[in-house]
Amino acid sequence: MVTTHLFSLRNLLQEKHWDACIIPTSDPHLSEYLDEHFKFRSFLSGFSGSAGTLVVTLSSSALWTDSRYWEQAQKELEASGITLMKDGESNTPSIDEWLSQQLNPKAQVVVDATLFSQSSFNQLKKDLKEQSLELRSTVDLASQVWLNRPKQRFSSIYEHSVSPRSRKEKIDLVQSKMEQLHVDRLLLTTLDDIAWLTNLRASDIPHNPVFYSYALVSKDGALDLFVNLSSISKEIERSLSMDAIRIHSYESIHDYLKNLNKGSLGFDPNQTNAYLATQVSDRVSVLPISNPVTAFKAIKSDEEITLIRQAMLQDGVALVRFFAWLDQEKNSGELTEVSVAEKLFEYRSALPRFTDISFETIVAFGPNGALPHYRATEKNSSPILKNNFLLIDSGAQFPEGTTDITRTIPVGSITYEMKQDYTAVLRSHIRLAMAKFPLGISSQAIDAIAREPLWRQMSDYGHGTGHGVGFFLNVHEGPQRISYPRIRPGQSATISDATAMQVGMVTSNEPGLYRPSRWGIRIENLVANRLAGSTEFGTFLEFETLTLCPIDLDCVLVEELLKDEIDWINQYHQRVRDSLYSLVQDDPKTSQWLLKKTEPLSH
Amino acid sequence: MVTTHLFSLRNLLQEKHWDACIIPTSDPHLSEYLDEHFKFRSFLSGFSGSAGTLVVTLSSSALWTDSRYWEQAQKELEASGITLMKDGESNTPSIDEWLSQQLNPKAQVVVDATLFSQSSFNQLKKDLKEQSLELRSTVDLASQVWLNRPKQRFSSIYEHSVSPRSRKEKIDLVQSKMEQLHVDRLLLTTLDDIAWLTNLRASDIPHNPVFYSYALVSKDGALDLFVNLSSISKEIERSLSMDAIRIHSYESIHDYLKNLNKGSLGFDPNQTNAYLATQVSDRVSVLPISNPVTAFKAIKSDEEITLIRQAMLQDGVALVRFFAWLDQEKNSGELTEVSVAEKLFEYRSALPRFTDISFETIVAFGPNGALPHYRATEKNSSPILKNNFLLIDSGAQFPEGTTDITRTIPVGSITYEMKQDYTAVLRSHIRLAMAKFPLGISSQAIDAIAREPLWRQMSDYGHGTGHGVGFFLNVHEGPQRISYPRIRPGQSATISDATAMQVGMVTSNEPGLYRPSRWGIRIENLVANRLAGSTEFGTFLEFETLTLCPIDLDCVLVEELLKDEIDWINQYHQRVRDSLYSLVQDDPKTSQWLLKKTEPLSH
């Protein structure tokens, strides 16, 4: 089947006199998660992972993906004729290097320009030029090859009614930033930024409450919103017009940009697709800027944090009901990864304000847990057997906030080595949870605090320690991330002030440990930056742990915990108990489980 | 007096039709420490600190310096008419901003181009241009103003005879790097890099065993060395010629660069002065590169580390004799900061292979210790009184290596708060000393490991945790530094691969805590990167602590130390005792003191 798809693509290449094609994992808004309509790379290659780039010439093809997906890609690419390129390995050629080996000088390499940011398109052009190759651009390549392509889904748009900040207030923020940047108009293309700014939500992309749209903010505070017209009710349109928001059809953004007459237009070249950037009229002066909405969106107000705490209470109720059930059933031998995920969904669905899960639930038993992005499917779901770890990473969307939590629990008996690993991961989690750090420090600079206990035993994990989390928005958002800068020989890394830690940022704390083919461990809570205090040495931040759910202690080697770590666990469990007990009191099984699981550890 | 000097400078400015002048703290080799000959900024301003930039217009003057020097500069600039500009404070204007306020558009700003790197000169030119100001360059500005200017000192050059690596071996390293960079000739201007490469030493700059020189390495491995001819003996010249090193006079570098005929010349624009860069003939193609010697020099070979351990034993003997003496005398009320520094010098001088101190010894009692760069002078030396900390930061040069150590000891009785501070600094020192971390990680990424205990109590220190240290060379050398990247709003920081941690790098571990007007604490040892081991998660490094001298435990709150921290102290003290006891056995006072000070702490 895969071969047929590549065959159609190659026919198109030949017909157009193109020599190669690069297919990224992307949509015109450069979203991280894609709707089926945009899964062209996956359609062509058969590789279903969420990150990867396919490159196809008339006679060869290769797929670049990072270490999280090597095992999966190896399986899924089998017999496809597509070579797996292990991104991040030192001997893996870059795409331009590989193309230069496959093609003759002056060969034409085509991309769909709507799927690349303007910056990455220009970089690619430069890289290919250095290999004497030429970059050509086209639009909507997929439709020319993909028969029966799923239609782009547009869902109903609704108000994020509990948002404590009005869209007017948010647009004011953006407006004052525009004044500072001397920008007459600001073009926004990233879906979560537009949803945040307008206080609107929808479900165009699974688990991300966003809608396909573009927005143009004018310096007078008016906003032109380009959306699917039938997704928006008259009532919302009226309400928007009260806030000087004008509605246009989604597709008309192109004409609108072409017909701009004067003034300056700011957009982020790292976030705006290369095709759209070319649509802008020559009569306006284009200013490349860093999207200010990303920074505003990252900082949650006190009122928003208060709502997020409510979301955590709601999710906490489902979680303790679920884990109490799981503790009773896990040794039955009758559970599978998929059935466990379904049960968790069932408990969450029962919550009155549950809206969606915030990403596909990961339930991974034993060796599956060692693949940080493992997803069980109906076809490929392992049974929950004995004597290994069960890792569950999941989250939910509530109007009050987005959750993301990972717990790892033992099934059957666990070896001493496994307990050592579990204890080290727990220590990493706690070291970071307890940390204080200077206001404004780069989030990247504190990663080592989390990793220290794991490094001491010469173990580590290949992913970041933390990502930003949206407020009833995407479970992954920038700009802060707790992840130390990695530098390759001869290269350098840039630490931007966008990663500076500010009060109100919400981030995950999720160290892990993965022993390939053996087991995986991850412990994740969400944390909010709050003021710790000011001294003669400056102002310091600390984390408020938001997530409310007991952490398994059956696998802990208590003698390896430091005194302050035991204190942290006991205080956390006391808070979990105090917060949730009254909410599950009606259910004796769950409330008894909660009491047992939040018993203090003794020193 | 100061006024007279500025008056002479202003006369010159008027005569030449210049409107302002910028005087940095620098020499033509952009050295960190300066000989008297080059202390023009200090001569003009009266400010004696080791960092600062003076800017003089016809009617105003200002001096920029960082927080380490604010208190000192305030005193020294009193009645000079020079405004202190607190570098690093958010409301302090940059030099170009300030100049634009002082001058009319198109005004001429002059600098001595030999005192700026080519990069910083070009950046300054750009910054001034944005303020509508013009940058002019001159050479040897100081001599035109400074009557009785001290002569540039040239000392005798000698072989670093114990160097385990021959200069041939080192030049080979550079040669292969040049081949990789396609460079026909490499220009070196940094004095420690030239001393390292040629295995030659001298004492042109106090405490830095270097000599004024330039070097040109050719791709065939020949090296042209430009030095003061009378500093070099016939014997050394002969020995150098055996290694294809040709000697030229120091001044002739300019003509030599002018007369180059062809090929490519590589130099580091961040290390080569702007005037020298203009001297290069148009017939050669100039390649801006990163100086490869800096990276080679940072990585000490196993044999070099073995010698450095011997330097530590030698210095350790002087240190324990000194501290045993000090413990007996410190409460006498008769010591002063200067007399203590002299006593330490006396003990070190008695060592047969002692060559020099590696920097001006800091002995700082009580509030003086809160100034991280405090230097007592004959005129200004505090008595050692009671009930405060005495901080001693010092180092020595031996042919076997360079040392740098700080100890803080109590005099009289110490409050609980002081003990809390001392314990937190000790914990920071130990957390870093015990750390393991991935091979190749940026040294900047591990800083948070040291700061975590201090941050937990919302304290901090305003300097880096560690700097590279030379091998019988400068006590400060690059490229690694343990210091997290600081980012200001709207700006970003670059982490270069040059800071990647490699086996054999020698770095200081020196956290501190400074309470202005109250006390200062710093605990410093030198550490070498060594392999910790390899696991499925990669290769890890750890630190070997090189410095051998007891750490005061009288001020420690043992109950605040974690178990592994007590273990580290006990193991370190056991090693100090085992290493030094037999070397001081002849001296009962010292050996008894050593035994007492290395008694294990109990949990």
Image (cartoon, coloured by chain):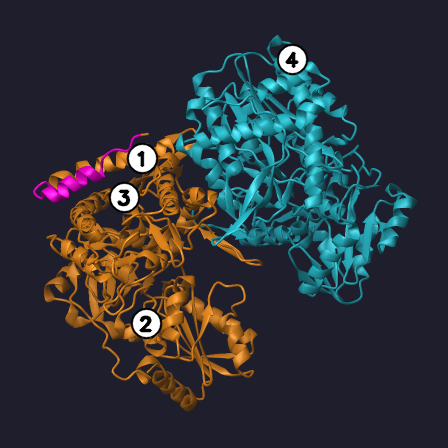
Chain colours: A cyan, B orange
> Looking at the figure, which quarter contains the C terminus of chain A?
top left
Amino acid type shown at disc 4: Leu
Are both tags, 2 and 3, on one chain?
Answer: yes
Which residue is under mark 4? Answer: A335
- Density class for disc 1 (Cα within 10 Å; few <14, some 14-19, many ≥20) is some
Amino acid type shown at disc 3: Asp
Amino acid type shown at disc 2: Leu
Which residue is under mark 3? Answer: B552
Left or right: A211 with respect to A54? right
- Dot 3 falls on a residue whose secondary structure is loop
**Is there CB contact under 8 Å for labels 2 and 4?**
no
Residue A27 % position (x, y): 71, 42
Task: Please say if A88 is above or below A603.
Answer: below
Left or right: A288 with respect to B206? right
**Is there CB contact under 8 Å for labels 2 and 3?**
no
What label does residue B568 carry, if any? 1
Spatial CA distance of label 2 from label 3 is 55 Å
